[in-house]
Image (tube, coloured by chain):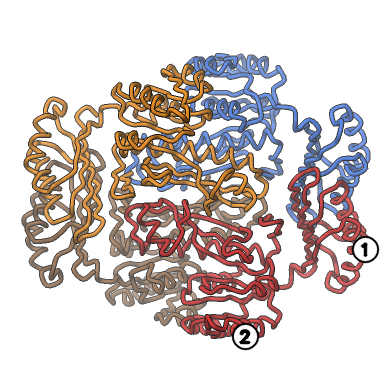
Chain colours: A red, B orange, C blue, D brown
Amino acid sequence: MHNRGRLLIACSDRPGIVAAIARFLFECGANIVHSDQHSTDPWGGQFLMRVDFELPDLVRRTPELVRDFDRKVATPFAMSWRLAHAGRRKRLAVFVSREEHCLLELLWQQRSGDLQADVVAVISNHPDLEPVAAQWNVPFHHVPVQASDRGAAEAQHNEILSDGIDAVILARYMQIVSAAFVERWRNRIINIHHSFLPAFVGAKPYTQAYERGVKLIGATAHYVTEELDAGPIIEQDVQRVDHRHRAADLRRIGRQVERMVLARAVRWHVEDRVLVHGNKTVVFD
Amino acid sequence: MHNRGRLLIACSDRPGIVAAIARFLFECGANIVHSDQHSTDPWGGQFLMRVDFELPDLVRRTPELVRDFDRKVATPFAMSWRLAHAGRRKRLAVFVSREEHCLLELLWQQRSGDLQADVVAVISNHPDLEPVAAQWNVPFHHVPVQASDRGAAEAQHNEILSDGIDAVILARYMQIVSAAFVERWRNRIINIHHSFLPAFVGAKPYTQAYERGVKLIGATAHYVTEELDAGPIIEQDVQRVDHRHRAADLRRIGRQVERMVLARAVRWHVEDRVLVHGNKTVVFD
Amino acid sequence: MHNRGRLLIACSDRPGIVAAIARFLFECGANIVHSDQHSTDPWGGQFLMRVDFELPDLVRRTPELVRDFDRKVATPFAMSWRLAHAGRRKRLAVFVSREEHCLLELLWQQRSGDLQADVVAVISNHPDLEPVAAQWNVPFHHVPVQASDRGAAEAQHNEILSDGIDAVILARYMQIVSAAFVERWRNRIINIHHSFLPAFVGAKPYTQAYERGVKLIGATAHYVTEELDAGPIIEQDVQRVDHRHRAADLRRIGRQVERMVLARAVRWHVEDRVLVHGNKTVVFD
Amino acid sequence: MHNRGRLLIACSDRPGIVAAIARFLFECGANIVHSDQHSTDPWGGQFLMRVDFELPDLVRRTPELVRDFDRKVATPFAMSWRLAHAGRRKRLAVFVSREEHCLLELLWQQRSGDLQADVVAVISNHPDLEPVAAQWNVPFHHVPVQASDRGAAEAQHNEILSDGIDAVILARYMQIVSAAFVERWRNRIINIHHSFLPAFVGAKPYTQAYERGVKLIGATAHYVTEELDAGPIIEQDVQRVDHRHRAADLRRIGRQVERMVLARAVRWHVEDRVLVHGNKTVVFD
């Protein structure tokens, strides 16, 4: 993957964009391996593209590539864009509270090679999962959160995250993060939460789901925005349950769905497959 | 199926219930073919049971059977119960408005033998689906509904339903039914509606789902209660969608899920597989 | 969809292909609405692409477009390619024997608008489904097949299909078609058959599946090749079953899966989403 | 779960079986919490039942219970049967070769409480997974297998398994076990293997699946019998793939399906939910 680059592009749609990008890459000597493109509307919509290409000597040529692409293609089309090296592994910080299932799934998928990224920090408001982090040789940071002084905890978080972190994963972290934190990590904080059809408002959702006799238990992974649990959805899935499942079983099954859905969302993010547009995502999976 | 009977039983749980039922059937000369039992809690919960049995000469012996079971078993245990003949096809009235997909699925499954029941009346507040009913030789009743006089329409509905109807299916019927109607058909009116994770409140749910970029489109079939769309859930399912689906595609896929979910719910109801307990169902599928 | 065109392209992969295509379309005044591209291998593999574009006055300009694309792009890159008009509805001939479920699903999806194509002929070796075709106003052709003279039937088939047919759907047609027929309709005959894990060789597969106690019943839709049931797979799906399902239930559930899988495969074919490469398909769904 | 017992029963079906069992339990003072019953055919078929009951002082009363049930119920109906204590955790030996995914899933589900059993031995023909076992504090036994002397390895296996093992899990163990071993552990050895629709015979099945372009990758968990991979199926599942997945991706996804399917099968076995009848299972899940 040494010479594999990725362009992630968003701009207003109009004729000639693909031609300009493809021509630029061709003239550089790159070969397009895979490209995904989506236009929200053929006339006047948003143009979104992910291009995977191979280019000999990619790392050395990157500064020149960035400068030229900006001048020749990105500026004329007023693009938001970035260039990613497929060969560089992203560094993840995982926030947890007391439940281990999502953290474990990520650590495991990292080891098995399913997840091409490194969990380099586990941060928690509780000490419970320190042994899990220790077992996998990942630094564990216990940062208690006082309701009266959230700023102190956040200062510690920022300190830890200053170490070249690419993305923050809220893996059942039961605390709210501040608007400033959301702003700094815009579209780079992924959260997971349970989901039901229909939704249950208020406390003890699994008890409510049990009492209504739902037949499906689901989970939603999304980017975190200022509005709680209302950010762009990355992935969702469900599992079937029935009347023999008690509220405790629903919670257990919910955990299984959560860890699978979160792991898929993180994998897609890590592979630069998720583009955000308005309050929704385009996933080039 | 001539000699196949079904007992549907609910009562407070305590030791000896299964023994009493099984002994009664054995002494009648019946053979238990299949039984499903569920206790919501081993001590002090609700006992629910569905027993399929074969008994020679069932139809002739039914009055005696009912009398004896009531005296020897049902009364001592304070049971709610009924006896159904598996061989008797249920008669369904289907309420529709303008969309045909749910009605068509039911008519089709009736013809293919997947649904062992007969649609004997189609009732609509619009004339649009008269040709569909005609194509399948089912009487069609156009009963317009005036917001100012819902009672008049309901009187007509009652007249039509007086003809030995077993269950009412709201197959995308876009009108509210009265509390009196719900009471009369308690646990015998099945409704279908779309479902999302998360739920979207307000108008144009598919547009909202599109704007949030949901990854799953679902449907819920439930018994109708006085509270809109909050009755006991019988069945739910979802289908996967992505960013390439426009709001119109989501609606199209939603229709596919709706017809499948409704058809399964109706089939289970028709086969006496659904027991209601509080605001939830036990489905012995 | 009047001015919506589609380019379907296959060639050996090398740098510059996307650039050449995109530039050509841009210089014509077309806007790329959606493009999907897949390379089987970045170096020396096969390049496959589907481009949806909008071009004012498409129909009138088509002859010029075809001539120019061939000269400027297709010939230099030695492409296999074709141009399709998204606005032109394809004409389908559906072959059946005695089972109606697949035919009905196609007719229905045509009417509901899910399938943007027209079933213009139903051909059968049995007269049983004539009433179904009549109910939907589609010409029905009863063409009996004698094992001793398959050529006679095929001559009749060819006669019927000469009427501008785009694709042939074998919707539970229980006869083998000849190698010459396969050759003439290469990658335009779609077949559906049941599938199990593991596969069951020999007669009565549902009975075998029942005796082994399989937990999933599946179906596979594929293009027909000279080797029976071994052509490129377009779509597959499964449904869950358990020990309470008897062999007859497995057959019933198998029919439900078959009609859904076939309908999806036909829809993708009709929308030019399926490209064949070797013995496999690329589905740009 | 101290006083929770389970009866697992199989016999020829005839009237009165449920009555006899239920009466026996009632007279002992037990309360039936849940019962599942299945008859393969109402007249002359096989009767299978799983009864969960609560009985005060169960452990002390077990010898008397077994003696009485045998005399009063099991002998008259010629039953195969056993009594299990729900509160006793089963002891599992897990056989592995080089791949860790199935072993890890079991260890993890044991820790999270999803699997109510203990992995007490890991046995492998390779030393590779010793660190995994060590990380989870489970004894690891490296038992190399020589093709020329399989008996020596099996003698070691028997020695290790003599320590009160309840079931043997082949978690990607790439060696064949002997007929004598199968006989000794009849219906207590669970194996997992990949499954495709259609099946691929011969070597490199994932490469074949890739070349045919399958759309689903599956796995099957089954009891091991003398005939390779043809024993009674306990559980199966699939995951969707497409043309963008290379052979290596199919293998990766196959591993995900394998670990989920195996874990479900082991859980059902451990909870005495699986009854074998002929070459199929009845799973009372």
Tell me the crowding category of disc 2: few under 14, some 14 to 19, or many 20 or more residues within 10 angstroms, Cα based: some
Please state the horizontal and vertical placement of residue D68, each as a whole percent of the image.
7, 60
* Vertical order, C160 against B195 (above or below): above
Please state the horizontal and vertical placement of residue A29, each as a whole percent of the image.
89, 61
* Closest to the observer, C36 or A226: A226
> Which residue appears at 62% of the width and 53% of the height?
B212
Give the letter of the chain under mark 2. A
Horizontal relation, residue C158 to residue D273: left or right:
right
On-image quarter of the C terminus of chain D: bottom left
Circle 1 SS class: helix
Q: Are marks 1 and 2 on the same chain?
A: yes
Give the letter of the chain under mark 1. A
Q: Which residue is mark 2?
A: A156
On-image quarter of the N terminus of chain D: bottom left
Please state the horizontal and vertical placement of residue B89, each as a whole percent of the image.
30, 27
Horizontal relation, residue B175 to residue A115: left or right:
left
Name the residue type under label 2: Gln
Give the alpha-carbon distance from disc 1 to disc 2, as whole Å: 39 Å
| Residue D252 in view, yes or no | no
Tell me which label, 1 or 2, sits earlier in the chain: 1
| Quadrant of res B177 | top left
Tell me the crowding category of disc 1: few under 14, some 14 to 19, or many 20 or more residues within 10 angstroms, Cα based: few
* Vertical order, D130 against C128 (above or below): below
* Vertical order, C103 against A107 (above or below): above
> Which residue appears at 68% of the width and 46% of the height?
B244
Q: Which residue is mark 1?
A: A71
